[in-house]
Image (cartoon, helix red, strand yellow):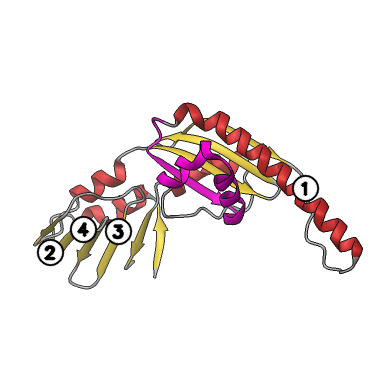
Amino acid sequence: MSRFVGRANVRKRLAPLDGGEGRTSYGGGAARIDLPDRVVVVRPPFGLHHEYEYERVHLGPLFEALATDRIVATLLIRLGGYAVGVFEGERLVASKVGSRFVKGRHKKGGSSANRFRRRRDEQAAALLDEATGTAVRVLEPWRDRAEFAALGGDRQAVERVLEASRELSWLSERAVARFFAVAEPRQRVLERLAYDLYSAQVEGW
């Protein structure tokens, strides 16, 4: 079972083990730490290029990868709202959020349900168009500098936006593996995303 742990907490937990008994294997973007009583595997959020095996616990390359700040373009969308931002390290340096009412699903059938569905589709399309335009305006100045992209909210809504806009196709190319399933794309949620962006996937704790 794996879980995501903040980078400061990973270092705090593992630092006392550095140099001690065990074996450390780096490869495939992860650090595998074989301890006398358990095995811990850590995958930093933005990769780990170091590859080597040590006959002891050697955590320097892992800590370096966790500590490295990145420039990350962020796009969060759900039917009802969106949030666009750019992080330099854990600092949010550019952002724009918006919302637009989209009706919930209609549970009854008949012609009224068809009218309701058409209206809902129109509202959803308007929201996605607005989110697309905002994302292009906010993120385009950072296109050459952003190393990674973080996507989240509702996966289908995000995919619709990226498929419809050539100006945003680069986000898919630089997207990290983790999809951030936030419930509400709001400014406060965007600001708190920094912790999750730099959380590592850990197994064995």
First reached walking from the N terminus: tag 4 or tag 2: 2
Q: What span is in magenta? A: 144-173
Say which residue label 4 marks: 27
Q: Main secondary structure of the magenta part?
A: helix
SS for callout 1:
helix
Q: Amino acid at mark 4?
A: Gly
Which numbered dot is residue 122? 1
SS for callout 3:
strand
- Nearer to the camera, 205 or 171: 171
Give coordinates of residue 22: x percent, y percent.
14, 65
Give coordinates of residue 72: x percent, y percent.
43, 38
Seen in the picture, residue 61 relative to 138 is either above or below; the reply is below
Disc 1/disc 2 C-alpha distance (Å): 62 Å
First reached walking from the N terminus: tag 1 or tag 4: 4
Left or right: where 181 falls relative to 124? left
Residue 68 placement: quadrant: top left
- Nearer to the camera, 106 or 153: 106
